Amino acid sequence: MKLLVQIPCYNEEQTLAATIADIPRQIEGIHCVEILVIDDGSTDGTGEVARQAGADHIFRFVQNRGLGHAFSAGLDRCLSLGADIIVNTDGDNQYCGADVPKLVRPILEGRAELVIGDREPEKVAHFSYIKRKLQHLGSVVVSRLARLHVPDVASGFRAYSRDAAMQLARSTEFDHTVDHVIQAGRKRIPTLSVPIRTNDKLRESRLFSNIGVFILRSLGIMMRVYSSYRAMKIFSTAGVLTAFVGGLLGVRFLYFFLFTDEGDSHVQSLILAAILILAGFQMILTGIMADLINSNRGLIEDLSFRLHRLEIPPAKVDPKEPPVKETTSANAVDGH
């Protein structure tokens, strides 16, 4: 059983060494533990720090491409290196690496394929009151959308089985933390959360400049991901409501036209009713088309999963053989 711990990094020379040192190299049930650092075009000494700290593999983009690309490239690289289990952690040493065994245990025991570390945000000292409440609210909303119970959706400290890593689509435009929870729920991938510890805060978050940006971006991600799976429901509901309002206006016009002498003065209602009814039907048709597109997406994802299994068979690992260090330069590699 081979475990790869991937660490997406961007200018983390001050914290990366501590992050790597905190990761256990001996875990019960795991024969081989290796560390992959994805250097997302860092302009400092992140790559050199990774080598000196003992990273087994370094995968580097020549320019910064963002966390989504780095995460996606890391998963594909881990799969190609023969990982049976993949753990993702952050290079800022936010998560306690000693809790990696807690993450992989449910996968080793066959109880889950995706395990999410629960930081218990309400207890994290450096989280503000507003952030704690927003984290809780966001987790509740996403859990309902995914039909799962995930108390800390925003946690990036996660363990994936090989099959789960292949099944979960990796759109680099989405925040993978939210995206993967909703996908896991919709695809019925066994998912568990386990309590984990966090280290002291070493720097401010680079993903969000303030709470307002965090809220807007999180809402946008939730709406976009959910609509990808529930487009028929969303568009049909909007279409029916729009057509219903149009129908009410049409009935109102007919009343004045048939039973009063004011029919000519309510032509505007008739025009608006026609527009709303047509718009409602158009929304319903759009929902049907979106549902068909989503069905095709499901087929494509299933085909991608099967191709991954054919192209990247599990590697045979000799536990006595030391891992080989590797440095990879990525020019136009997207990780897909």
Image (spheres, rainbow, N blue to C red):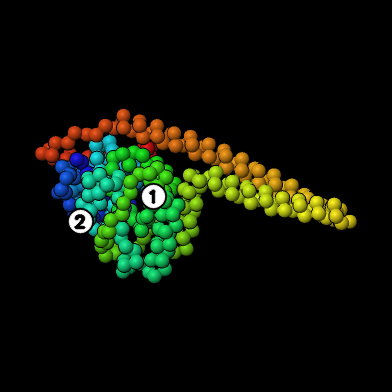
For the N terminus, which image quadrant? top left
Q: Amino acid at mark 1?
A: Val
Height in image: 89 above or below 78?
A: below
Write down the residue under mark 2.
Answer: 98
Outermost residue on the right side: it is: 261
Residues at marks 1 and 2 touching, judged by CB atoms closer than 8 Å: no
The residue that appears at 49% across and 44% down in the rendered structure is 228
Label 2, residues with CA under 10 Å away: few <14, some 14-19, many ≥20: some
The residue that appears at 42% across and 51% down in the rendered structure is 147
Outermost residue on the left side: it is: 320
Q: Judge left or right: residue 43 versus residue 25.
A: right
Q: Secondary structure at mark 1?
A: helix
Height in image: 247 above or below 213?
A: above
Q: Is residue 298 shown to the viewer in this render? A: yes
Q: CA distance from mark 1 to mark 2?
A: 24 Å
Label 1, residues with CA under 10 Å away: few <14, some 14-19, many ≥20: many
Q: What is the x, y in percent for residue 256?
A: 83, 55
Q: Amino acid at mark 2?
A: Ala
For the C terminus, which image quadrant? top left
Q: Nearer the viewer, residue 111 or 324?
A: 111
Between marks 1 and 2 in the image, the one whose residue lies nearer the viewer = 1
The residue that appears at 31% across and 29% down in the rendered structure is 310
Outermost residue on the top side: it is: 310
| Badge number at residue 181 | 1
Q: What is the x, y in percent for residue 173?
A: 44, 46
